[in-house]
Amino acid sequence: MKNSTPLILKSVSELKQWRSSLSENQNIGFVPTMGALHAGHASLIERASKESELCIVSIFVNPLQFGPKEDLARYPRTFDADVSLCHLAGASVVFAPLPHDFYPSEFSTDVEETKFSQPLCGATRPGHFKGVTTVVLKLLNLVRPRTAYFGLKDAQQFLVIQKMVQDLCLNVRIEGCATVREADGLAMSSRNRYLSASEREIAPLLYKTLTQTAQKIQGGSNIELALNQGVAILSQAGFRVQYLELRSLDTMEAIAGEMTQSSTPGLLAVAAHLGATRLIDNVVISSHS
Ligand code: AMP
């Protein structure tokens, strides 16, 4: 089964029919994506395929999670290559609905997590996480997987989804998968293909600055000072920084002053534009140095 070409389901009704042909407690692994797949996505699909009887990947550029001035129209769409990658990574099924089928004109429901979704990308992309939780809940209800896999490259998204699953008692396990990086440290992203050759040369500085800032903070430096220095380094190199912040992984509250033995683990997260491309990345800082 895992070696044959994936079954392609192109509508919600095809997905419903397929799901109803399986047992409710079938061990399904689910990987939601927006396509333009790369090795980061492949790592999630490979893991889901290994840990499940059946791996399904959704490919859907979700209009609800894009702001009016964002890149919905030009978001890369590479469907045939995506299906090949899904096949190689072990997926059995690809779900790729059209927007008007997934969100018919009478669709009128939003799902919103209101705490973990507020800072960082929630503050810089209003409405983004509401779009994410709405699409993910609908996908989880349709697919009814045992486990759904998300990348820790989008750490805040992972935390928001985990919170939704906990708050709404959804019967699914959420697994986070490590960020896959290029050899020079740049986190793989569908948006990296927007970078010009010169921007691509500068881009790895984002991760380098994150790790250097993390080392300073872990070594006892004042947090605000280390963050300000990080922003200065990135700005000087040509990034337009939206945020570089350290927040508690447990509460998403900002961590100020110094990391101490008793501090909760921190998420050091950054978002910055390089030219027209918005890049995000993060590292986790443990409480003890
Ligand atoms: P996207 O297609 O960008 O919505 O991503 C689909 C899933 O792949 C999300 O759970 C992302 O966090 C995950 N993902 C994207 N890039 C990477 C990466 N470089 N490493 C690991 N997971 C990733």
Image (tube, grey):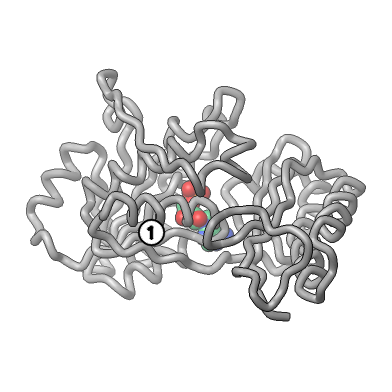
**Quadrant for the C terminus in the image:** bottom right
Q: At 65% across and 70% down in the image, what residue appears?
A: 263
Q: Residue furthest top?
A: 105
> Do we see residue 138 in this rendering?
yes
Q: Which residue is mark 1?
A: 86
> Do we see residue 40 in this rendering?
no
Residue 210 lies, with reference to residue 33, above or below; the image says below
Q: Residue furthest bottom?
A: 289
**Quadrant for the N terminus in the image:** bottom left
Q: Is residue 202 left or right of residue 192?
A: right
Q: At 73% across and 41% down in the image, what residue appears?
A: 242
Helix, strand or loop at mark 1: helix
Residue 85 lies, with reference to residue 134, above or below; the image says below
Residue 68 percent location from the top left of the image: 56, 23
Depth check, front residue: 58 or 92: 58
Q: Amino acid at mark 1?
A: Cys
Does mark 1's beta carbon lie closer than 8 Å to ligand 1?
no
Residue 168 percent location from the top left of the image: 29, 49
Count the marks: how many? 1
Depth check, front residue: 25 or 225: 225
Q: Residue furthest right?
A: 236
Number of other residues with Cα within 10 Å of mark 1, as a class: few under 14, some 14 to 19, many 20 or more: many
Q: At 59% across and 35% down in the image, what residue appears?
A: 125
* Residue 169 position by quadrant: bottom left
Residue 93 percent location from the top left of the image: 26, 55
Q: Is residue 163 left or right of residue 25?
A: right
Residue 195 percent location from the top left of the image: 72, 44
Q: Is residue 19 left or right of residue 95?
A: left
Q: At 76% across and 56% down in the image, what residue appears?
A: 206
